[in-house]
């Protein structure tokens, strides 16, 4: 993909389930052609990931079988043209990542 274009999946740094879900989403997006860097980011309250953490921070104190991830599936620094085809593909990839998380 274009140099410098990043896709990110942010999870609470304390959460093993969040890390697994984020990793499964990274796998589902690993071959997109609009980004050259797809990765999971552990979120902390004292660094640049804090805003993503604010979206999911209360999930960590919930039931142990719940995982939360903040998604930036179209890029952290600009997005491709959001066509219907692209958005459908993104939805399928998110579903594939969640299915992998649950072992499907």
Image (tube, rainbow, N blue to C red):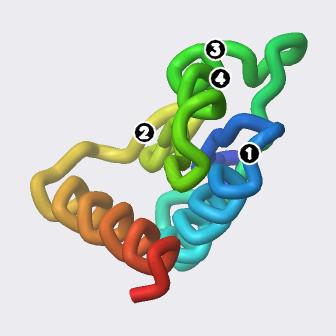
The CA span between labels 2 and 3 is 19 Å
- Check the image and name the residue furthest to the front: 63
Q: Which residue is mark 2?
A: 79
| Nearer to me, 99 or 72 | 99
Dot 2: element: loop
Q: Which residue is mark 4?
A: 53
Mark 2 and mark 3 in contact? Answer it, CB < 8 Å. Answer: no
Dot 4: element: helix
Q: Residue at x 60, y 15 (%)?
A: 54
Q: Earlier in the sequence, mark 2 or mark 1?
A: 1
Residue 70 drawn at (x, y percent): 52, 36
Q: How many marks?
A: 4
Q: Residue at x 16, y 51 (%)?
A: 83
- Foreground tag (3 vs 1): 1
Dot 3: element: helix
Q: Is residue 31 above or below residue 66?
A: below
Q: Residue at x 17, y 62 (%)?
A: 88
How crowded is the residue under tag 2: few (<14 C-alpha within 10 Å), some, or many (20+)? some
- Foreground tag (2 vs 1): 1
For the N terminus, which image quadrant? bottom right
- Foreground tag (4 vs 3): 4
Q: Which residue is mark 1?
A: 15
The CA span between labels 2 and 1 is 28 Å
Residue 1 in sight in this render: no
Residue 102 drawn at (x, y percent): 45, 75
Q: Residue at x 51, y 72 (%)?
A: 101
How crowded is the residue under tag 1: few (<14 C-alpha within 10 Å), some, or many (20+)? many
Q: Is residue 104 above or below residue 75?
A: below
Residue 103 shown left or right of residue 88 in the figure: right
């Amino acid at each position: 993909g274009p140099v410098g274009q990043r896709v990110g999946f942010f999870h609470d740094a304390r959460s093993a389930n969040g890390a697994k879900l984020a990793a499964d989403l990274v796998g589902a997006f690993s071959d997109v052609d609009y980004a050259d860097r797809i990765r999971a980011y552990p979120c902390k309250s004292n660094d640049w990931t804090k805003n993503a953490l604010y979206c999911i921070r209360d999930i960590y104190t919930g039931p142990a079988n719940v995982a939360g991830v903040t998604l930036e599936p179209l890029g952290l620094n600009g997005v491709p043209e959001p066509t219907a085809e692209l958005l459908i593909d993104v939805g399928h990839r998110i579903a594939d990542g969640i299915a992998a998380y649950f072992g499907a």
